[in-house]
Image (cartoon, rainbow, N blue to C red):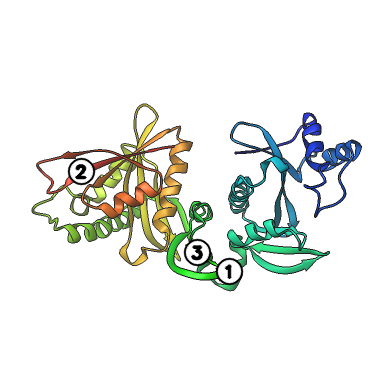
Amino acid sequence: MNIRIMTESDLLNLYGTLSDSEVMKYIEAPYTLDKTKAFLEKAALIEKPLIYAAEDDNGNYIGYVIYHEYEQDTNEIGWILNKSAWGKGFAGKLTEMLIEKIRLDGKNAIIECSPKQEATKHIAGKYGFEYKGQKDGLDTFELKLNRKVFEETGAKALHLNVFSENIRAKKCYQKAGFTERSVKENAFSYKDETWGRCNMFKMLNGMIREVKREEISLCANIIKKSFKTVADEYGFTEENAPRFTAFATTDERLYWHMDGEHRPMYVFEVDGVLCGYYSLLLQDNNECELNNLAVLPEYRHKGIGKELLEHSFKIARSKGCSLMNIGIVEENTRLRKWYEDNGAVHVGTKKFDFFPFTCGYMKKEL
C-alpha cells in the first residue's frame, strides 16, 4: 500500500469518495463537486497537508488518510475509504503505516469518530488506542507513543496490550521496538467469541549511538560476556573453541574494526551503562555482514536486541546495502528462529575443523 501527497488530478477521485452517501453516513452530508474542490484546495494542496491519498498495492486510489497536528505532541490520524475498499483489511494496514509515521515523528496519536462508527472504534481498540471520552460530539481514542510524556513521569518502560490474534498489530508494534512479554489465552470474551491478550514491552530510557574510541574495551567486554552464555549452554571452551567470539574478541580486534575496516559500530546505552553492541562489515555487491550483535545477560528480554537489529537494517540501507549476511551457531535454534521472525532467511551451513559446532548462514533482504 502507499500513502502519497494529493494533486489537482485527484479531484474526481476525491469527489467519488466524498459524494457517496454510504461513505459519508456518519460524517456529514455528501459533497458536491464544488465543495470537494474547495476541500481539496484547503486540506490537501497546502504546504502542510491535512489529508493524503491512499493507494492499494497496484497503485489504485482507494480513499484518503488524515494526518495532521491535533494538539501539542499529538497528531490526528484517520481514513475515509471508498465503499469498494471496505472489508479488505486496508483500514488496518493504513493504521499500521500511520502509527509508524507517528512514532518516527515523536508524537502521540488521536483517532476521532462518530459514536456510531463501530468499525473505526474496533480498529482503535485492536491497535492499543484507549478511549478518552467525547470532544465536540465525537468519540476520541489516544495512543501514547511520545517519549516526552513518559520522561516527565520517570517511567523507564512502556507496556501495552493487543489481541494476541491480531498479528498485524503485533508486527506494527514490533517495528516500533516492542517485544512480546506474555500472552494470556481467552482473556476477553464477547458472545461466543474469545480473544487472547498479548502484553508487549519497550524500554524508554535507552539510546543507540556510535561507539567512541575510548569505549572499545567496554564493547569487547559486552561481546565476550554476551557470547559466554552461548558457550556455556553448548559446552564451548577456550580449549575446544578458541576462535569462538566469547574467547577470541580483543580490544585490538575492535580497534582494527574501527581504524582498519572503518566499520559502523554502535552501542545501546541505558542510564549511562553500555549494555548492547553491534557492527557492520561493508562488503562488495551492496552487501554487508552483521557482526557481534550482543546484549548483556542482565539486560535481555527488554527489546534491546530487537532495537539494535532494526537499527542495523536502517544503517545498512543508508550505506547503500541491499542484502545483509548473518552468521549463527546452527545448533542455536532459538537464535535462528529470532532472526527468521525478523525477516532473515536461512541459506546454508558449513562445518569447520576448528569449531565444535556447525556454522549457519542467513540473509536478510534490505
Which mark's residue is nearer the viewer, 1 or 2? Answer: 1
Q: Do the residues labelled 2 and 3 touch (CB within 8 Å)?
A: no
Asked where in the image residue 43 lies, by quadrant, the reply is top right
Q: Which of marks 3 and 1 is nearer the N terminus?
A: 1
Q: Earlier in the sequence, mark 1 or mark 2?
A: 1
Relative to 170, 281 lies left or right: left
Q: In this rendered view, identify the residue nearer to me: 64 or 144.
A: 64
* Residue at mark 2 to residue at mark 3: CA–CA distance: 35 Å
Q: Which numbered tag is attached to residue 19?
A: none
Element marked by disc 1: strand
* Residue at mark 1 to residue at mark 2: CA–CA distance: 49 Å
Q: Are marks 1 and 2 in contact (CB under 8 Å)?
A: no
Residue carrying label 1 = 190
Relative to 324, 58 lies left or right: right
- Measuring from the top left, give residue 304's x and y in whole percent: 41, 58
Which mark's residue is nearer the viewer, 3 or 1? Answer: 1
- Amino acid type at circle 2 is Cys
Residue carrying label 3 = 205
Kindly give the residue lying farthest to the bottom in the view shown: 153
* Residue at mark 3 to residue at mark 1: CA–CA distance: 38 Å
Graded by Cα atoms within 10 Å as few (under 14), some (14 to 19) or many (20 or more), the crowding at tag 2 reads some
Element marked by disc 2: strand
- Amino acid type at circle 3 is Asn
Asked where in the image residue 141 lies, by quadrant, the reply is bottom right
- Looking at the figure, which quarter contains the N terminus? top right
- Amino acid type at circle 1 is Tyr
Residue carrying label 2 = 359
State the residue at coordinates (26%, 46%): 328
Which mark's residue is nearer the viewer, 2 or 3? Answer: 2
Q: Which of marks 2 and 3 is nearer the N terminus?
A: 3
Q: Are marks 3 and 1 in contact (CB under 8 Å)?
A: no
Relative to 127, 21 lies left or right: right
